[in-house]
Image: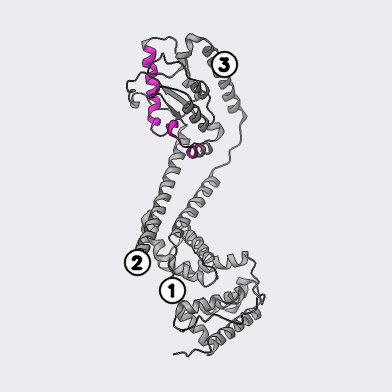
Amino acid sequence: MEAWYEHIEGALKGRFDAQRALYEALAPRVLYTCRRYFTQEAEAEDAMIRTMTTMFQQLPTIREAKALPAWLRRTAVNECLMELRRRKVEWVGADALPDTGSSATDSLHDREALMELLRQLPDGYRTVFNLYALEGYSHAEIAELLGISEATSKSQLSRARQWMQRRLGNFDLQ
Amino acid sequence: MSSQDVDKLFRDALDQGQATPRPEAWARVVANLLEAEQKAHQKAKPKRRTLWWPYAAAASVAIAAVGTWWMQASRPEAASNQLLVSSNQPPATSSQLPVTSNQSLVARYEKPETRDQSLVTSNQQLVARYSKDFALFDVAFLPRMEADALEELVPLLDRQVVVAVQAPAPEVPRPKYLQWAANVQNLWSAVQEYREAEVPANVSVEVHLPAPVLRRINQTKTLASNFNQSLNQSWSTLQSRRSR
């Protein structure tokens, strides 16, 4: 059983140390998820903080404690989407894809380099790519979440992929 | 590289990762939770219909009390009797008389009928009745910020603030600040008045608040101490990370 699981009971009883331990165990995963949606670290941290606050508020209502990480991930994604919507991000083709990317991908196996590459995408492309490739949403679901058509979702994803392929083209997949 | 390869590459690399948050983030989570809790608490308070007669009754009692006090205070022989005065002896224990923090301001300024030894004794008891709550607030040492925070916590109608004075002897003349403090409305002004007045060193001024207000202040203190604790922990975490 993972370390966070044993702190649930104490956190539910309102024990400060258990709540802190639960936070320490789960916040890094949430922050990592949020970092994929924003270019600025501060924005990702804000989304993580809102997600963790929601978690502590909703903790008594979560029936299956084992499902907490999955619940957290969904909530984190929703928080990120809410923030992007609040900022009135235009999902469709508002920003051109950058012509030059950084030389981030010195190693395809460097996760941080791939993260940087992902974060170079404009908000709209990055969001669709994240939701489809990493969260596993269908185009119909993405269309509903972002208020766009399925065709738009598909084209955004396709263009994001092509851009990624160009950036990754010089590297050999081992 | 096919498009599916791109998806797989990112999924494998970025699906399950961890990023260490800054230590300050935990303090912000706690602050958010406290804020939400306070908002929920405020929402949960049922709205009561305002009744006019309790205010009218309170106003008339207050006017009568102030009038009585004024008339008695204007007589020089009676002036010192108004003080809640005791000798330097330690006050009787508070268990002798039950503390009723909700008692109104008026009751505290009843004029003793005679000025003799029994008066001092009764005043000692009166002081002792307050002493249970004395430990909480001694305005003389109240910093400006705390006085202001206290002001905000005490709604206007709840301000049954009583100032009691423990003086070395009944002969001590009534100082200016006490006359003013009899109808104290602003705690910081009370503190200032007290500090400016040249009073004997062992005179102390203390403030009494209604029981519900005291409870709220204590709750706030608990929340604040939890928050400080979390900040300290965040700070120590930061220090330990830096030292590594």
Q: CA–CA distance between discs 2 and 1?
A: 16 Å
User: What element does badge 3 sit on?
Assistant: helix
Q: Identify the disc placed on residue B67.
A: 3
Q: Are marks 3 and 2 in contact (CB under 8 Å)?
A: no
The residue nearer to you, when weighing A120 against A102, is A102
Tell me what residue is drawn at x 46 percent, y 76 percent. A112
Q: CA–CA distance between discs 3 and 2?
A: 69 Å
User: What element does badge 2 sit on?
Assistant: helix
Q: Identify the disc placed on residue B17.
A: 1
Question: Badge 1, how many Cα within 10 Å: few under 14, some, many 20+?
Answer: some
Does the magenta run of residues contain B139?
yes
What colouring method underlies this structural image?
Answer: one colour
The image quadrant of residue A43 is bottom right
The lab-note entry on whether marks 2 and 1 share a chain reads no
Report x, y in % for residue B80.
Answer: 45, 14
Extent of the magenta region = B118-147
The lab-note entry on whether marks 3 and 1 share a chain reads yes
Q: Identify the disc placed on residue A18.
A: none
Q: Chain of mark 3?
A: B
Report x, y in % for residue A136.
Answer: 52, 78
